[in-house]
Every structure is written in C-alpha cells, then in structure tokens.
Image (cartoon, grey):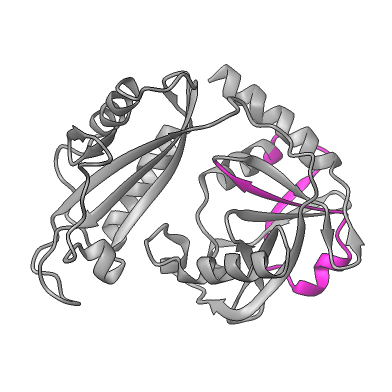
Amino acid sequence: MINNNGHLISSAEATVSVSNRGLAYGDAIFETIKTLNGKILFWEDHYFRLMASMRILRMEIPMAFTPEFLESQILELLNHNKSNSNSFRVKLTVFRKQGGFYTPDINDVNYFITADSLESDLYLLNGSNCIIELFKDFYVAPGLLSTLKTNNKVLNVLGSVYAKENQYDNCLLLNTNKSIVEALNGNLFLVKDNVIKTPPLEDGCLKGVMRKQVIEILKKLPDYECVEASISPFELQKADELFLTNVIQGIQPITAFRKKLYNTTVSQSLLAKLNMSVRLS
C-alpha cells in the first residue's frame, strides 16, 4: 500500500504524471525513516528537518502538516501493510505541485509515503567487510542545498555505479575544496586517538538524523572529543577507525581503504549505546 496525499492505494494503482515536478526538475525532498513496533524512531528530528527543508526550498507548508498529522499518516499506512515485520523503512516524499517550468506556477505541495519491511528490528553490526574508495569523478558543492535530502541524487547514483563496477562496498564523496563530505548513503566519522571527527554541514554533508544521534551520544562520553571539522583524504591513512551512519543501518564500520585496515572498537561501543537509547525511547 501507498499513502498518496492522504489516500491509501495499492502500488499497482499508484502513478506519477510526466509533469510531476519531482520527476521533471528534482523539485522534491524526502525523509527516510525507520519505524519499530509501530513507533517512528527520531520522529521529532525528522519532522523539523523536513519543515526546515521545505522552507529553504520555498515550498508552501500546509496548515495540516503538524507532527501529529504526518505521524498519523505514516502509522495508518503501516497498519494497512500486510507484513509480519516489526520494523519498516518508510519514505516520505514531498513535492511541489505541477505547473510551470523552472519557475513553478504555485508553491503548494503534495506528498506520498511508502513503507518496506526490514529484516532486523534493532541496529546490528554488519560483520562483513566494508571496503571503500574515493569517488573523484564529480564533486559536491559545499553549501546549504547539499545538506538537504532532495531528489537531486545523481552524484550518489554515479558513485554507486562506480563502486559496483569496481567491487567496492561504498565510496566517499568529496566537495569542490577536495575535503571529504560523506559516503554514498550516510555520514562519515573518523576516529584518531580520543578525537572523533565528522565533516561540518558547511562542507556540504547531509544533515543526517543519525549523525545527530551519534554526536549527542559522543558528547556524553568523557573519553572522547567530538569535533565537526573538515577531513582531508590524507587523514584516512592515519585514522584508527572509520564508520558511517544512517537511520536504516545505524552505524556501519569501514574495514579497509586501499591498504589501510581499521579497528571497529568505537563503532561497536556506540552501536550498543544507540540500541539502548532506542529501547528506552
């Protein structure tokens, strides 16, 4: 089932107009959300990021778009989903109504919500190798627009094709200043001694919801200093550990970059603390 602007329909019935602005111009934003046992994880962070993104893109926010309304729309879809899974990957997409070319006729929006079942409920440490490389064919433009989850993800698509063709598990993206921004599907954290770095939003990395959760956990740990600072590719060879974060996988350790092998001690410890916070919520 799909929630299409408040109406539940089957996926077979769902259609998109060729004039849809999200399709035609990438004039859309989305939230990827994990739910567990009928509860939306980190919902407040997702909601406020969505509202901030709509304002930045000058979309008209409907009066009905309260946290309670959108939450009810997601949960209604899950209630009608014929799956025995306790956990779902939910995608909430908001797009400007069709009309106009580059200049839209109106700034009103429509939305749709999809849900796919997940195999695991809590976050698990992926025991398989995660070998990465730099993707240097194209670069991220540092700035506010790059921090949003818009439909303009062709750079991530090309990076994913490159990774698949060359048998890498992931790639790191760089901005035009040649600083590392993020991975293809998540934010990056670098561990060196007792300092844990993650690229700042000013460098163009996604304003990740899981990134925020991990930063908040790290601030409570006296043994580590968490800093938001630019990361040079040269720092990868000197790092003790690298890991990626997103709301579906949680924390994904990187095991190798070229000839450099990494520990997974910090990521394992953080994953346990993350699952504890999920249970308590």
| Left or right position of 148 against 182 | left
Q: Quadrant of the N terminus?
A: top left
Above or below, comparing residue 5 to residue 260 in the picture: above
Residue 20: x, y in percent? 19, 62
234 falls in the magenta region: yes
Above or below, comparing residue 28 to residue 141 in the picture: above
> Going 27% across and 62% down the picture, which residue do you hit?
22
| Picture quadrant of residue 70 | top left
> Going 86% across and 40% down the picture, which residue do you hit?
265
Residue 216 in view in this figure: yes
Viewer-closest of 194 and 122: 122
| Left or right position of 74 against 244 | left
Residue 267: x, y in percent? 77, 41
Above or below, comparing residue 249 to residue 88 in the picture: below
Residue 221 in view in this figure: no
Residue 115: x, y in percent? 39, 35
28 falls in the magenta region: no
Give the number of marks.
0
> Going 45% across and 65% down the picture, which residue do you hit?
153
| Left or right position of 157 against 131 | left
Residue 31: x, y in percent? 40, 46
| Left or right position of 78 against 280 | left
Viewer-closest of 70 and 119: 119
Where are the magenta residues, as a range?
A: 218-247
| Picture quadrant of residue 104 | bottom left
